[in-house]
Amino acid sequence: MAEIENVLLLAGDALLYFAALAALLGARDRIGLGPFFCALGVLHFLETYLASIFYVTLPFGIVASPGSTVLFAGKLMLLLLLYIREDAVVVRQPIYGLLFGNVLVFALGFILRHHNVLPIAEGRSADFVFLDEMGGLMVWGTAILFLDCIIIILLYERTRAWFGGHVFVRLLLSSAAVLTFDQAAFFAGLNFLTGAGLPVLIGGWIAKMGAVALYSVLGTLYLTRYDRPLGRRAVPRLRDVFDTLTYRERYESLLARTGCDALTGALDRHSLEAYGRRAVDSAAAAGRPLSLLLIDLDHFKGFNDRFGHAAGDRLLRQVAHDIMAASRLSDFTYRFGGEEFVVIADGVGGADATEHAEHIRAAVAAARDPAGGQITVSIGVASCGRDATDYDDLFAVADRRLYEAKQSGRNRVIGPLTK
């Protein structure tokens, strides 16, 4: 009976924790993200303390701690929700803050032990052994958290291609995978510092999987019912997420050095003329594959006529973001003009280029336009070497294939070796 009571109490802890932190996250437009970050930081100490010393028994002999089961699993889910509703730049702020603060705790604890302390009451003195243990665990746990956040975001974005808009499945799979890794990594440090045994590893993992299921339900409700965006925000490209989290922002640096289309955020036509020609010449000289993807938004004029130019602009931004999200880090996306975009995919040719374009087409088609209808694009693909060896001819081949895709019914890709 006590085991069932512990399960219910853990569920109550999780509901309270998530509801309170999610409310702060949802109020960020009114009160900023400072309260949310501060609350995470305050609870970080309690999380580590409980994970090191406070364990309860659950049914079937499972041993688990509210610190790792409720607080850490919940924190990771909330950071993923923060990424989904904001971006990777925002997510890295609390992670680096926690890591810096924990290292500082460890350093200050080392200095404090050299003070001449005045006891204020008999039997009361600072427990520096405990402080060292907690400091070490917090530094170790935050270093793992850094990796956890990178992996969970990459997995969440990767599962977009498999499950599309099924948020619950994507939250569940990405969280389960990352918390499995985290349990093994944190246990290594816990075992080293406290001597925790194997039941803590196994029981903690089982309890975390239960927490994953609960938090995935709560996270889905948060995203679909409570914090629904007014408009679709930019979805970063998968490999750019890793760059952003690790301060290697190659794409942002490129935008700073070259022209950027003010409406969509893609590179502009002037940049295409400058870079595209150099890229094709370089690939042709080296015998390296390169492909040009010419992308046209289907039925855009009709959409503009029905809903107006403001809605048309929002749709163009959305399509540009979806194209960049589905592209590789090494790809460059340009707005050629009107509703046409160009992707230069260096290192990809032939059937692989057609497959890459199909991935982009499917990613756009998985979304909905601001009016709730399906968005589709037609794509013509041309590969350097196979189709042409200079930029103008390559573009002409892609344009001819785009026309063929339009004439064949739209929402399709025509490229090298298209069947």
Image (tube, helix red, strand yellow):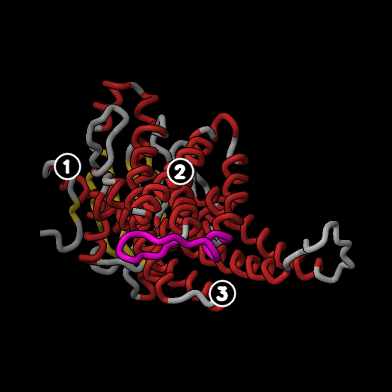
- Residue at the image position 28 percent from the left and 40 percent from the top: 367
Name the N-terminal-most of marks 3 and 1: 3
Q: Is 340 positioned to the left or the right of 329 in the image?
A: left
Amino acid carrying mark 1 in the image: Arg
Q: Secondary structure at mark 1?
A: loop
Which range of residues does the magenta coloring cover?
A: 48-64
Q: Quadrant of residue 304?
A: top left
Residue 259: numbered disc: none
Q: Residue, x 18% and y 53% (percent of image)?
A: 414
Foreground: disc 1 or disc 2: 2
Label pair 3/1, CB-CB below 8 angstroms: no
**Residue 34 vs residue 197: left or right?**
right
Residue placed most toward the observer, 21 or 122: 122
Where residue 62 sits: x, y (%)? 36, 65
SS of the residue under disc 2: helix
- The residue at the point 46 percent across, 60 percent down is 65
Q: Amino acid at mark 3?
A: Thr
Q: Which mark is residue 194?
A: 3
Give the crowd class for mark 2: few <14, some 14-19, many >=20 residues within 10 Å: many
Kindly state the secondary structure of the residue where label 3 is placed: helix
Q: Is residue 315 above or below residue 385?
A: above
